[in-house]
Image: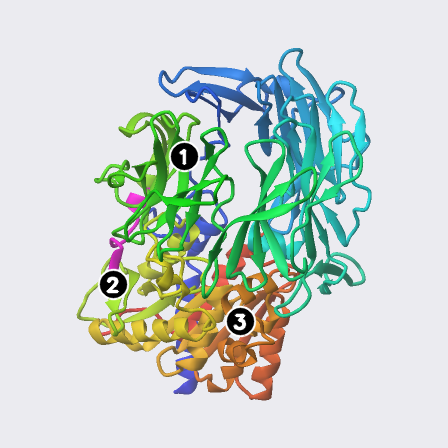
């Protein structure tokens, strides 16, 4: 009987996984090939777009009709739809070359006479921020490359001076200024090295504070302010590359793990003609504080910085005198847990006397007007709701535009409010358009590039007039992709709330098979994240993630995702910060409570076929659920997990857990590795050995623990892949094929009576 059973199981697995080509020809069925190795579900693209200062014209990139592989830069009139080629691809062919530059990004000089082109890019951690920069003069069509004889792909963050006579850039951790006429290059810093970093950042500042471009021109163009990091005290984590040469070699990454030494950070101002740097006299130990944001005030004599303590529960907004380095605190935001960095680029008005500020000081994320003279904060958006982001200010008419969703945390809409705080917010997004909306608003706040999507509706981009939201032109309709989605055998997604007791209701979604029968039993796959960095339950297009889940639903699975407390939903500060010093504990408890309630109230969910999967923080959550609640979850697929919170970086882990030296018990209680002895079910662990974010060390440590406990499991190492596990031919296809096979093997689909 056992031999027959194993043969039948293998046959079913073969039939499930391998009739790929037959299914590929059926437009109603989703396959792994369609998702991961074809362009079948690819949508339209647009941009990058740049609004011009007149507030009615914008430029964008479009394929050239004249030169194969070339790109034209075109300008549109938002009101009339008039289109004009501003820069034809033929003008972007360097002297002596046959092909035009491939544009990764572009920027205009203030008077739009000069165009800065970013090309030949190279990846630095998450993004391609190194490359070559070219300047095109639209008056005489001269095209030249910045950097003189610099090595290819070594320049970073080039930007024009306000008077557009020079450009500044970072190269090999030093800052340079180049004259755009004479091409004379002035080196402003000379101490740049692997550990002394000028004008850009180390790994942890980039990953956790979203800082990459580390210098700013002064408004008068006479000075440059910049970050300098001293990483000499930070230990290198050595990534081992076994695949790219005959002998293995190491890649050192400056990576401060929780509780260890950070880079020292300071802000300097240097004359754009060269000379000594004036260092801002920011108080405190630079290794135990962060300068999370820096920009010039609306003048050329002062800087505004955001100064975080190491625990990140105090953000001091400071004014720095650029000439003397003297520093004073304008105001402070504090919290018992942590303070989020929400103000990236301050919006100035009243001749630089005021700026807009987002703060959670009253328990909700609200907009304030901050006074440069007194530090007083005047509330603009009173009410028990969160402002998600500030989008634009209409200075002429006194309005601020912002994204919020007071009644549904899974959606996003555009609102506006009087800057004086009088009246109530007015929803601009039409009420008959649910889902998620984002806007790129023109400088005068009269026009916007509007992007809309929902859970099973691909993005649509159009030009709208504000505030009436009248659509003038559709930029991307995705009509072909929409038709393909309509052809699929799917059921409408169900958004729901689940009551887990004590008045706590969690948002969730449920994807059911297209032929769902409530009288039958179905295996359920929970998709989890649950960390403070992201939500999973959002009414927006998720692309591959949605398609893979729908593919599984077509084959008889029910997919459910729930957002526990502590996720960044717009539900108030207390909702988000309740997990402070309880990462891994409270969230998994609420996920398990939600699963129990759903299994109890939805009889079509089979309690004997419950699986869970997640990536990164979701991989950690998967392990916590499988280890802490083994009687609920039978199978877990954990991708790139943090298994021990001590192994993750300072800024992220300490923000939510405090210092490990002060709470070693909390760190231990939140780490899934310490509960591995409870494993009863099936476990698959997947990790990239070249992961510079969540190190492969995490998985190796867990593997050692499971071996010592004699616990069976499976593991897949993707050699030299980073955290996204996408590098190399067919990597994504292989990964999701692996997850699909493992799920079907251990929690077989096929509804049961």
Please provide percent x and percent y for residue 456: 31, 48
State which mark lies toward you, 2 or 1. 1
Q: Quadrant of the N terminus?
A: bottom left
At horizontal 70% and vertical 35% (from top left) the residue drawn is 169
User: Separation of disc 2 and disc 3 at Cα?
Assistant: 30 Å
Query: Between disc 1 and disc 3, whose residue precedes?
Result: 1
Tags 1 and 3 touching, CB below 8 Å: no
At horizontal 43% and vertical 75% (from top left) the residue drawn is 585
Residue 264 quadrant:
bottom right
Query: Between disc 2 and disc 3, whose residue precedes?
Result: 2
Query: Between disc 2 and disc 1, whose residue precedes?
Result: 1
Q: Which residue is mark 2?
A: 497
Residue 526 quadrant:
bottom left
Q: Which residue is mark 3?
A: 685
Marks counted in the figure total 3
Q: Residue furthest top?
A: 140
At horizontal 78% and vertical 36% (from top left) the residue drawn is 188
Q: Quadrant of the C terminus?
A: bottom left
Please provide percent x and percent y for residue 438: 38, 40
Magenta residue span? 484-497
State which mark lies toward you, 1 or 3. 1
User: Separation of disc 1 and disc 3 at Cα?
Assistant: 44 Å
Q: Is residue 390 left or right of residue 332?
A: left
Please provide percent x and percent y for residue 428: 28, 36
Q: Which mark is residue 392?
A: 1
Q: Is residue 467 left or right of residue 1?
A: left
Residue 388 inside the magenta-drawn segment: no
């Amino acid at each position: 009987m056992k031999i027959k059973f194993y043969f039948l199981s293998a046959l079913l697995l073969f039939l499930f996984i391998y009739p790929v080509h037959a299914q590929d020809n059926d437009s109603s069925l989703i396959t792994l090939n369609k998702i991961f190795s074809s362009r079948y579900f690819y949508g339209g693209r647009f941009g990058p777009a740049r609004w011009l200062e007149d507030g009615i014209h914008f430029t964008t990139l479009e394929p050239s009709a004249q030169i194969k592989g070339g790109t034209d830069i075109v300008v549109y009139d938002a009101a009339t739809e008039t289109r004009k080629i501003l820069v034809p691809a033929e003008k972007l062919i360097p002297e002596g070359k046959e092909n035009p530059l491939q544009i990764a990004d572009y920027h205009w000089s203030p008077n739009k006479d000069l165009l800065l082109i970013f090309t030949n890019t190279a990846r630095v951690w998450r993004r391609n921020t190194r490359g070559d920069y070219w300047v095109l003069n639209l008056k005489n069509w001269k095209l030249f490359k910045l950097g003189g004889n610099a090595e290819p792909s070594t320049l970073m963050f080039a930007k024009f001076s306000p008077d557009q006579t020079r450009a500044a850039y970072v190269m090999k951790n030093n800052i340079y200024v180049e004259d755009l006429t004479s091409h004379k290059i002035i080196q402003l810093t000379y101490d740049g090295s692997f550990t002394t970093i000028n004008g850009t950042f180390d790994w942890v500042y980039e990953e956790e504070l979203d800082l990459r471009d580390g210098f700013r021109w002064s408004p008068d163009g006479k000075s440059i302010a910049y970050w300098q990091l001293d990483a000499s005290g930070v230990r290198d984590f050595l990534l081992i590359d076994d695949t790219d040469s005959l002998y293995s070699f190491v890649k050192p990454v400056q990576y401060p793990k929780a509780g260890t030494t950070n880079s020292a950070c300071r802000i300097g101002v240097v004359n754009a003609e060269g000379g000594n740097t004036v260092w801002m006299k920011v108080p405190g130990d630079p290794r135990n504080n962060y300068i999370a944001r820096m920009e010039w005030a609306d003048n050329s004599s002062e800087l505004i910085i955001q100064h975080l303590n190491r625990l990140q529960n105090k953000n001091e907004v400071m004014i720095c005198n650029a000439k003397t380095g003297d520093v004073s605190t304008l105001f402070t935001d504090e919290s018992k847990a942590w303070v989020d960095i929400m103000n990236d680029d301050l919006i100035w008005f009243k001749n630089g006397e005021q700026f807009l500020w987002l703060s959670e000081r009253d328990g909700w994320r609200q907009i304030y007007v901050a006074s440069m003279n007194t530090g007083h904060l005047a509330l603009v958006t009173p009410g028990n709701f969160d402002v998600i982001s500030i989008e634009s200010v209409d200075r002429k008419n006194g309005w601020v535009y912002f994204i919020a969703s007071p009644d549904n945390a899974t959606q996003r809409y555009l609102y506006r409010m009087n800057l004086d705080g009088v009246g109530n917010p007015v929803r601009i997004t039409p009420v008959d358009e649910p889902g998620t909306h984002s806007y790129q608003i023109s400088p005068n706040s009269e026009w916007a590039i509007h992007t809309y999507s929902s859970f099973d509706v691909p993005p649509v981009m159009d030009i709208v007039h504000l505030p009436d939201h009248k659509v003038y032109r559709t930029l991307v309709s995705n009509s072909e992709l929409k038709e393909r989605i309509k052809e699929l055998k799917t059921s409408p997604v169900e958004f729901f709330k689940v009551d887990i007791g004590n008045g706590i209701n969690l948002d969730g979604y449920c994807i059911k098979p297209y032929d769902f029968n409530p009288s039958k039993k179905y295996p359920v796959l929970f998709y989890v994240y649950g960390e403070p960095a992201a939500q999973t339950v959002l009414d927006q297009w998720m692309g591959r993630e949605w398609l893979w889940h729908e593919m599984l639903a077509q084959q008889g699975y029910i997919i459910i995702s729930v957002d526990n407390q502590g996720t960044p939903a717009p539900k108030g500060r207390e909702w988000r910060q309740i997990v402070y010093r309880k990462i891994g504990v409270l969230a998994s408890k609420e996920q398990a409570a939600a699963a129990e309630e759903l299994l109890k109230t939805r009889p079509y969910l089979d309690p004997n076929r419950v699986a869970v999967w997640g990536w990164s923080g979701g991989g950690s959550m998967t392990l916590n659920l499988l280890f802490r609640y083994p009687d609920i979850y039978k199978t877990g697929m954990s991708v790139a997990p943090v298994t021990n919170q001590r192994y993750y970086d300072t800024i992220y882990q300490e923000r939510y857990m405090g210092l490990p030296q002060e709470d070693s018990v909390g760190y231990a209680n939140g780490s899934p590795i310490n509960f591995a002895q409870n494993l009863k079910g099936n476990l698959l662990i997947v990790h990239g050995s070249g992961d510079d974010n969540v190190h492969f060390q995490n998985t190796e440590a867990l593997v050692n623990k499971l071996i010592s406990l004699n616990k069976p499991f499976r593991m897949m190492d993707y050699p030299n892949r980073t955290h996204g596990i996408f590098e190399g031919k067919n990597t994504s296809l292989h990964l999701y094929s692996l997850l699909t096979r493992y799920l079907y093997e251990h929690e077989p689909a096929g509804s049961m009576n």
